[in-house]
Image (cartoon, rainbow, N blue to C red):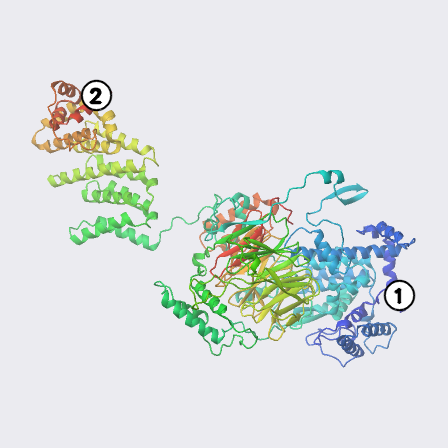
Amino acid sequence: MASTRDARAPAQDAGNKAAPNEQRLLWNPENVKDVAESVGIATLGEEGLRALSQDVEYRIGQVIAEAVRFMRLGRRTTMTVRDISLALRVLDVEPLYGYDATKPLRYGEATMGQPFFYIDDEEADFERVINGPLPKVSRDANYTVHWLAIEGVQPTVPQNPTSTEARTQDLLPKGPGANPALAALSGHDSPNFKPTVKHALSQEQILFFEKVQSALLNDSPDAEVHRLRQACLSAVTTEPGTHQLIPYYVTWIANQVTHHLDDLFVLRNMMELTHALICNENIHVAPYASSLCSPVLTCLIGWRLGAESGTDAVKEQYQLREMAASLVGQLAKNYHKSNSQIRQRLIRSCLRAFLNPSMTPQVWYGAILGTVAAGGPEAIRTLVLPNIKSFDSAILQPLGEKGEASHLDFEMVVGAIVKAIQSMCGDDIMMNGANGIVGEQETRLMKDFLGDILTERVTRLGNEELIRAVLEAMDFQ
Amino acid sequence: MSNTGPPSAGGTSGAVFTPQQAPTTTTPGPSAPSMTTTAVPPPVIPQPTTTAPSNQNLNQIVTDYLLKKGYKRTEEIFRQEVKDLDEAGRPRTQSQSPASNKVFPAGIYLSSFKHYERWVDNGIDLYKFELGKIMWPLLVYSYLRLVGQSSSLHAREFLQRCRGRFESQHTDELKALELITLSAHIRENPMAKIYLENRYVIPINKSLTGMLFHYLERELEQCGAVVLDIIQQHCRVDSVDRGPIEPFSFEAIYRRARNMDLDDVDIQEGIPGLTHRSGVANRDILENQATLKLGPLPMEGELRDDVAAELEEEDRIHPPKDGVPTLLDEFNAMHPIKKEAVDSPQRTDIPYPPSRARDVVIEMQKVRENRDRFRIEGRTGGAGPGLSVCMFTFHNHLGSFSCIDFSKDQLLVAVGTAESYIRVWSLDGKPLKSRLPPEKDLKVNNRKLIGHSAPVYTVAFSDAISTMDRALYEGQPNPETHSQLLLSCSADGQVRLWSLDLWACLCIYKGHDGPVTSLSWSPHGHYFVTGGWDKTVRVWAQDHASAQRLLVGHDTPISAVAWHPNGTYVFSASDETDKSIRMWSIANGNCVRVYTGHTDYISALECSPNGKILASADIGGNIFLWDIDKATRIKRCRGHGRGGIWSLSFGVESTVLVSGGQDNTVRVWDVEMPAEGSRPTNQQDGDGTIVAAGAQSDGKQAGSVAQSTSNTSSTGKKKGKEVMITPDQISAFATKKTPVLKVQCTRMNLVIAGGCYYPETQDRA
């Protein structure tokens, strides 16, 4: 036993030496002393006091450890009085009575040499409590339902936090091995996280595109080829999944048109393709509308389209321009909502070509058709008619006098203009057959306004309504 | 011979405390006999040879006997006498080696620890991890000895100066240690008891063992004496036949590559010198070798025939659309007939009540739901499946709801409250049906079940499924398939069974001593398992008032329980010092596996439907996935903030795991993808080069990733390294100030989540 005592001696020595340090106790020994006195122990040795304080600390720690367990079992992060009560109970200690467990306690802090905490209980006045109105009954517990996620994407409904509230970037895995597409997939993409895939086309789409290209450029007269071409176009018209291909189509069309101005076949097919794209309801062409305008305008008012001369070539050329004109109309009609510039741009281009005396008759033809298509009667009334007299004298007269060679061109241009003028009055132009003689007065006025050739043509139609419209347009001046 | 304190001799203190509950016989008597040599036993312990039964062992045997017979008094007196005898200098054979008998001066523990620590830290990196394993037991036992010899000042100083390196891994234990300041506490503190009554197992590489002991011998003066003594008294050094392991050593990487056990290596953080396992050697089964039958439970033959016949009929009446398999085919795929299934338990292992008409309908509906479910096909295109989550948010709860459960037919929800009552709502808003005649016309959509007298910690509905639209039996209504029973457990120590037809308590199961912390229905009904504060896990049958199995082995209260899907095993998790998960066989009551590795309170457990994987979550925000059979960790999923993951649920295919937690999120995890990425980079560094090398695709992508990380870290600097999210997280859905208490994957792979909305931001630690 001697050895034991010896062994303990140094330890105790050290303890005594560091006695001031020993006051690092969390629990104030004064408190223990007070309690001891209250139960009749007047003198409590220093050592005993310290031991008791340490024991108190230990017991409190035990209680807290148990209470933490019950807090976690209750799936909370705030400890309540009830947790402490339960902890005391399982430790076989008398539980605390008289503390309200329904709401978290509020603590006040006072400094009396060392920090001192107390429960901040308000004082209740009996009088007031008894006579005061009853407190409101708290609302009954209930639940609400919402979709936290639908197929992996969080819908933006009021019940879900906004992406800034949730700091969604913090919710995603980062670092090597992390999937960079997850942000986009889970519905919260952000400028921080640019899509890293350039613009991927599936193998099928590439194949499809190549088929379309080859079919449209194959000018063999074989019926089979023709059928394939038609099938391609109808596929482009109906295929819902070709959205990714639009930019490729647009670029391709532009390139082909630029480089094959002498090949009416190619140009025509490009226009067909453009038409097919516009007609496809499943894809969203609007962003590309202005890019589509350029090739269409080229086909409409190009200086020289097609190489060889000959009736067939001329006819095809006019047909191409006709087609381009209707495409212009379609573009203007379909996309002027999303692109406010598009209509003005089309009309301006056409009008400039129309009023340029150095152009060819084919250009004038296309230009007037384009103006009508893009601008409608309003454009004719306000933009074309005022200039028609000078056009008549400066262009039509010389053209008409050129003789047989340009007779067709002359007729085409005049016809187009008449058609344009006709567009000013309703749809039923053709139905209102000739129904009367145009008065001298009107003829004179019209001649002043339209010029001889056109006046003659227009009056020959014998459409009273039309003449009235023209005269009104004159008045509009 | 003052009896104020326990014997101060360090050498004997272990011997004094241990006998009251003798450790399993595999460990040698923790005292004298093993020190046959002077000073240092040669590389101590490969196979500790048991010496002839000494007095010590004899005493133990007697104590054991007395304990077993319940002669507690006698046992105590006997122990006292033995102790006195020992103290009084009873002839101690030749075992009085200087090392064990020596009482070390108080200061030497600190200097020894520091000396040893310095040696380890200055040694080569490869060995740091392994040699560091000694340090935790060294700290614990040194401290306990210091307290034991009443030098509390030294003890405190020792703990203050040495605890730093364990702060992250042994938080709870350090807290518990800190509390122990008087020698009297040692005798009653549960943690101290666990450590003193068991040997701490330290597996160390073979060659290092030699090196370690040679070093200790060499430095006997500076630290060897203390360390050796502690090792001899309290530890068991297992030399293992493998290369030295260290988070980035060849061995670790090699093992990781082959998906083997990492042996508690924490790769991601790379903190050297931690042992994940709590290390305490109360492991009656250390080998984790027992054969398991993890296959599904075969269906009862008669029931099977009935269901098959009815399904055939159903297929005839409502032929499935093209491309959809018939119900019968689906059924056969779900329950293939295997005559001799090796991995499946026998139906005779566990008795079940005979099946009823209700079971037929339920099985039929299960087949239908399984066929028509939303299929989760692995990880397509690297993004993972998009799950739908339906969220139920509770309002005006005054912070008292502690648990939520949804019935499996999605018709009812129950919450247990701290105010001791249970409340059940109908989810479709229709009035709750009651069988009681006076309540026939009562139209209420919620009910309170009152009976418990303390906070309710878990509620659980019995199995249910939506009912059939066709009358199965002529002239009779279809059997009810809704949830008819509700179980609840509470801090008052009771488990109650409630009828949802009568809205009354049917039965009280008493047995647990102290609060019942968690509860779970068997997947096949009839049985349920409870875990209690009294450290026991109990398995009950619905029709018996007392527990059918009493599973004892955990060192601290149970925090979570779960069933294996075939109904023949249960899992339980314990908190504080233990922090292990145990797997128990219901058939014989044995503990068949122990899973160790958590360092925080385990708040949820769930077993995958395929029966191969166990998921466990702790309040530190970690989810561990375990290979059930090998008892090894598959991976760790991180992403949840601290505060607790309250619920886990697997998808039907076992390929995704859904979790919900205190951090107001529901997260979806990929079970199949390895969490640790392709290489063991230290991600906290955010090193651009590593990221570039690690990303599989083009450099631009890697660049943008690096950029985005740096962006976020600069914006949210205050939470710099708070949570690292592993790449196997498929998605995370945030709620509005609503901690998620329950997530549940339905049989058709819809996720249902429940939580309580807290209008004011509550202070979350």
User: Total label count?
Assistant: 2
**Residue named by callout 1:** A5
Rendered position, A216 above or below B233: above
Q: Residues within 10 Å of mark 2 (few under 14, many from 20)?
A: some
Residue at image location 52% in from the left, 47% down from the top: A168
Does mark 2 fall on the same chain as mark 1?
yes
* Viewer can see residue B694: yes
**What's under tag 2, amino acid-wise?**
Met
- Between B452 and B280, the residue placed more toward the observer is B452
Mark 1 chain:
A
**What's under tag 1, amino acid-wise?**
Arg
Mark 1 vs mark 2: in front: 2
Question: Which x, y percent locates residue B308?
Answer: 43, 72
* Viewer can see residue B166: no
- Between A346 and B385, the residue placed more toward the observer is B385
Residue at image location 47% in from the left, 78% down from the top: B339
Q: Quadrant of residue B142?
A: bottom right
Q: Residue furthest front?
A: B438
Mark 2 chain:
A
Mark positioned earlier in the residue sequence (1 or 2): 1
- Judged from the image, the secondary structure of the residue bearing numbered disc 1 is helix
- Between B105 and A46, the residue placed more toward the observer is A46
Rendered position, B378 above or below A192: below
- Judged from the image, the secondary structure of the residue bearing numbered disc 2 is helix
Q: CA distance from mark 1 to mark 2?
A: 130 Å
> In the displayed structure, does residue A301 sit left or right of residue A125?
left
Rendered position, B128 above or below B760: below
Label of residue A474 in the image? 2
